[in-house]
Amino acid sequence: MSQNGFLEDAGEHLLVGAVGHLKCDTNYISEAPEESHGEEVCDTVNSSVVSGESIRFFVNVSLEMQPSQTAENEASGGCVLLHTSRKYLKLKNFEEEIRAHRDIDGFLAQASIILNETATSLDDVLRAMLRRFAQDPSHAEPGCDLDLLMAMLFTDAGAPLESNVHLLSDTIQGVTATVTGVQYQQSWLCIICTVKSLQRRHVCISHLVRPQNWGENSCEVRFVILVLTPPKMKSTKTATEVGRTFATMFSDITFRQRLLETRTVEEFKEALVHQRHLLTSASQRRRKSSAKYHSTCSFSHKPLQPLQCKDFLSVGKGIWDDIARRFPVYPLDFTEGIIGGHNAVGKYITTTIFLYFACLLPTIAFGSLNDETTKGVIDVQKTVAGQSIGSLLYALFSGQPLVVLLTTAPLALYIHVIQGICDDYKLDFKAFYAWTGLWNSFFLGLYAFFNLSLVMKLFKRSTEEIIALFISITFVVDAVKGMVKIFRKYYYGYHSDDSYTEKTASLASLLGLNTSLHADVNTSLLPRLPELTTEDSHVHTGRDTAVLSLLIMLGTLWLGYTLYQFRRRPYLHPYVRDILSDLALPIAVLTFSLIASYGFQEIEMSKFRYNPRESLFEMAQMDLLSPGAISSAMGLGFLLSMLFFIEQNLVAALANAPENRLVKGTAYHWDLLLIALINTGLSLFGLPWIHAAYPHSPLHVRALAFVEERVEHGHIYETIVSVKETRLTSLGASILVGLSLLLLPFPLQWIPKPVLYGLFLYIALTSIDCNQLFERVALLLKEQVGAYAWPQKVGRWPQPGLWVGLGGIPTAFSISNPVFILLPLPPPSYNLLPRIIEAKYLDAMDAEH
């Protein structure tokens, strides 16, 4: 039976409270009947089994070989037998088990703590910890031999010299049971040993300067806990029980992050005492209230109970609940990370700079697009001003300040549609735009008061990932379309006539392709023959501009993504790597803007247009439209409100995903009402609309997160430990965006459009970094599915093409035909898909991996 198979079976035993045994050699693993392993192991067997993330994995490894077998082993090439026994341990209950408190008190009195251990090998770390025992005058062991103690920690103790299997004998590690198997907590390792020559128990904790790779399931070790006990002890004082006490504390990822920030032994002790109080205060009453709180403040992918009509008839209840939930922690949004411990000023500064560039550059890009479509009515200046005002108000008064507001490509397209209607029917654009925005805000207010955001409970994880991947692909499409326009203008040097574009669009519509992208590509790559054959014509004078633009765009993408991944590299100090990773986008933008503007001054680059204005805030004349035109604006406003509703709630749900570990609660209804109020003002003054932006919001959360790394199947995965839920970064970025109006036209106009397109590619690439749908699609391009990072997940599907079809095909087709994206949305995902695909496969796609 394979090892993976054992882990899956162990998960099943976990539910029924059974215990499994393994007897292994180097090539084969099989189940063995349960045997007696002494009093200590029996205590472990009697421990009840826990589920979910509260699992302790006890490993007992022994090497057995008779002296008479030496010659036989020499003949077999040095092969030995390795016996492995795995057992689940129950979490220590600090509220009921008084022994846990005594273990911690005894350890604090002895204070065997080693901070900033520089040793890199496991043997050197353990020798330093054993020397700490020997050098302690108050707890000295007179008959203790350090070399003997060191040997007893490993499997080769007492084995023949021919045996070189140097593995730890008894360890306790934290594991998490998921739908795909078992994930090890690799940042800490608890080593236990029973020594006959000892007179009392000893515990030592070593904090390593850098994470160490000590083999499988121990690739990122930062903490080592060593527990030594004499053999004749009570069942509550054995090495396993003492190790279980400290393993329970170190199983908390937040606690481990707090220990990493300690600088002295006293701070380390204080963190231990604080964690003990936290574990002790978890009473049954508070657990119930906590469960109730989380059920009301977050939208789960699987609702506990179906929605009913009465949930939507309690007018304003959702808004009131959001305010009651978020208002008590409102002051903490300004003081967290600034006042008290766990200072995060450096992270706030780097995040603010990242957010400033991530918001300003798309704002300039979409402002330039609006300038072209509205003939200067909405230009870059007004777009920057609207972005600054709207984001500032949202950062101050929203319930979810980590959500980032931005004007997006769909909104720019909607503005283009409104301009076309106004041109066709001779309507005043400012008035029609204002009425459309007012109707949009009116419908959003209704959605908020009648608690319609509750329908987000019906959205599954796969739905969110498909829409998120669709948004990422639109960024790529925008970058490609922008580069195609540059090649049309500078490389081929012509603008296709209307008849040619119309024929191309008609053909594209018959083929069911994306019309705009298809027309741009065809009109650029298939120019008329006379223009290609004229050697001395002016159309060839800008080829260097087109080629340089392509290189600048790809260079911005390369440098930004390389620095973004730099924290995973072994170079430089970890603190420097984190800073470079957080500032990847600003560094890439500034570097290639300087290269394009100063390094190639003789080459003309495509830049956005700047129209100086006397006043940015001119209220629209609402009385210029007839009642019929106002009614038409209501229809457009309703469709626009549906876009706002889905985007705002979906992006907020992605930012508040369970793996992000946000703790202050959500405010979907209140934020939707606030978006309506903000866009009301923007509509009246002719400023572009804004709503929650993807992937900027999840990237904002990621920038404020503290992470812990683990290695599985040769890949590095990051787990978010905690997130600084602050308003300061959004406030700072909004203020900086507003001050950028003073930088127009110089130096902002020196940022060429290819840099903006490189920004789009960077945003798209970083947003799919943790998208499981994209990773499943990418598996089709890999040689062996089982050899990569998702073997358990793939094993749950009958064939890769099936699960790719569930997500990749609708996403790909939705670029040209958005109706395909409705397939995974409710109600199709609840009614249609289960009739096509078995429910267990859909559940595996929506599960946490």
Image (cartoon, rainbow, N blue to C red):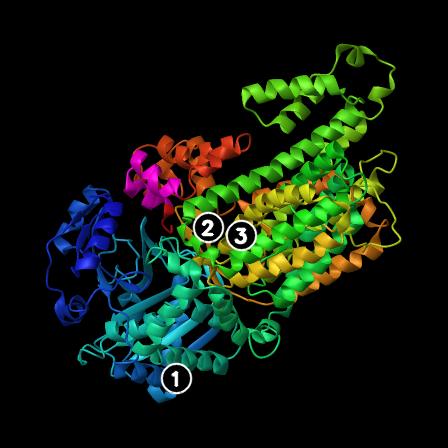
Question: Can you identify the residue that label 3 sits on?
Answer: 651
Q: Where is residue 608 in the image (x, y as percent from the top left)?
A: 80, 41
Residue found farthest to the front: 627
Tell me how far mark 3 sits from mark 2, CA to CA. 26 Å
Quarter of the figure with the N terminus: top left
Question: Can you identify the residue that label 2 sits on?
Answer: 716
Question: Is residue 606 toward the left or the right of residue 757 in the image?
Answer: right
Please name the amino acid that badge 2 sits on.
Ile
> Helix, strand, or loop for circle 2?
strand
Tell me how far mark 2 sits from mark 1, CA to CA. 35 Å
Q: Which of marks 2 and 1 is nearer the N terminus?
A: 1
Question: Is residue 267 toward the left or the right of residue 412 in the image?
Answer: left
Magenta-tinted stretch: 827-845
* Residue 61 higher or lower than 595, as above or below: below
Which secondary structure class fits the magenta region best?
helix
Residue 556 at least partly seen:
no
Residue contact between numbered discs 2 and 1, judged by CB atoms under 8 Å: no
Please name the amino acid that badge 1 sits on.
Leu
Tell me how far mark 1 sits from mark 3, CA to CA. 46 Å
Q: How crowded is mark 1: few (under 14 residues within 10 Å), some or many (20 or more)?
A: some
Question: Is residue 304 toward the left or the right of residue 573 in the image?
Answer: left
Q: Where is residue 310 in the image (x, y as percent from the top left)?
A: 38, 60
Question: Can you identify the residue that label 1 sits on?
Answer: 108
Residue contact between numbered discs 3 and 2, judged by CB atoms under 8 Å: no
Q: How crowded is mark 3: few (under 14 residues within 10 Å), some or many (20 or more)?
A: many
